[in-house]
Amino acid sequence: MRLAVTAMNITHDLVVIGAGPAGLAAVTTAASLGLSTLLLDEQPRPGGQIYRNVTTATARQRALLGQDYQRGLPLAEAAAASGAEIRHDSLVWDVAADLTVTALRHGQGFQVRPKQLLIATGALERASPIPGWTLPGVLNAGAAQIAMKSGGLVPEGRVVLAGAGPLLLLVACQLLDAGVDVGGLVETAPAANWRAAMRHLAAALAAPAYLTKGLRMLWRLRREGMPWHTQATGLAVLGNSRASGLSFQSRGKSHQIAADTVLLHHGVMPNTQLSRLLRVDHQWSDAQGAWQVITDDFGQTSLTGLRMAGDGVAIGGAMAAESAGVLAALGAAHSLGRLTEGERDQRAATPLHLLHRERAVRPFLDSLYRPSPEIVAPADDTIVCRCEEVTAGRVREMARLGCQGPNQTKFFSRCGMGPCQGRVCGNVVTQLLASELGKTPDEVGAYRIRAPIKPVPLGALVDLNVSQPTVPPVNAV
């Protein structure tokens, strides 16, 4: 879908989509270089997912969420003081090839068109398709953390956490610190992951803060003495009308843990909805089990003027995203003639060094927490597309009937046709089809994304006034 309008005039030097660490760092850098800069973000306050609500969090929330969370406060304050135009509560639902951005704010549609566009929309939590994962009472671990950040809320009753990844350990520690009854931690990483990860340990020592933090979390959880199961397989959520616990096998034994809430997590992956919409070049990463956007060191994609930075390109963490945001802003300034190549490269030396240092730990973490086979290729009767209730078996059937990719599968099975446009099921469907067809994920491809990338009211389209593209900014932290 594209609005039938004439090309609008340039409104800004740089528009940044996303107010996480990459977006905030980019806005501050760009404004300091004299670029007329606009930041658009869907949330009411800055911080993205990692620093959500950091500017208004209570002292108890900050203490509970730790020093890493509090790092977002000076980032948000610097962006607010930079002189850049900031519009929160702005849902970007379309971006055209000429970089015209269409968004919705307080029920009113508006458009802006920059000379350079930076997309910094971060990561999405990977789907955890196991039997019963669609029951009430089952959440992603990241959703539980968002509740803590947004309102200091924690689940009632007993909680069990299952999956693999640093966030799973972090949320478990935070829930314990908040006084939640954690009934058990169930890790699904296979034993082979440890052997694969050890090959990257020496390189990971270049970023010792990650390893130290991980050891502290492991010590905290071991000290608690709660049930901790490793190499778990056969996960299934118990319950009929809502979750009542989790069953699984671990080291040759069957287990059940009663719980009121089941939190699942199997890592995160880049949010590529906008980059897919714009048809820029992507590549499949076997290491991260996800699509990544192809960019240069300054975030430039295959579409001239479109840059991307942070976890929306490849998973690297908040510190890496911050450096990538600075580099993208420097690249934009150079393209617009505000910096010479020599000036750009001189300013880029430090953030580029920090970015490479932060990325050094990724091969270790990616290998250690690689999703188990049953998450990547769930059983036939397991739902993979929650919107349309399509099972893994149905996707495999589509491949046997001749569908060669996700888009044909969508046409014949409705898989990925719901309001999320495959944000949840897309990676799983690509991997299922690749396995069934004997192809690589790159050969199978991904869902084709169309605007609006999220549901918007019809009135927003009717009332869209492209002749007056600006709305009053909100620059308050």
Image (tube, rainbow, N blue to C red):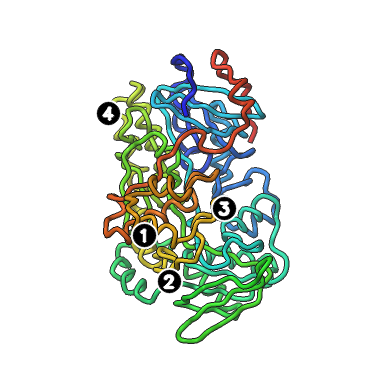
The location of residue 441, given as percent across then percent down, is 31, 53
| Percent position of residue 250, x then y | 48, 81
Q: Residue furthest right?
A: 156
Q: CA distance from mark 1 to mark 4?
A: 30 Å
Determine whether the residue tagged by mark 3 lies in a helix, strand or loop.
helix
Circle nearer the N terminus (1, 2) = 2
Q: CA distance from mark 3 to mark 2?
A: 26 Å
Read off the residue under disc 4: 341
Of mark 3 and mark 1, the one earlier in the sequence is 3
Q: Nearer the viewer, mark 1 or mark 4?
A: 1
The C terminus lies in which quarter of the figure? top right
Q: Residue at x 44, y 59 (%)?
A: 394
Residue topped by disc 3: 69
Q: Which residue is mark 1?
A: 361
Residue behind mark 2:
189
The percent coordinates of residue 283 (x first, y second) are: 31, 47
**In the picture, residue 135 is in which quadrant?**
bottom right
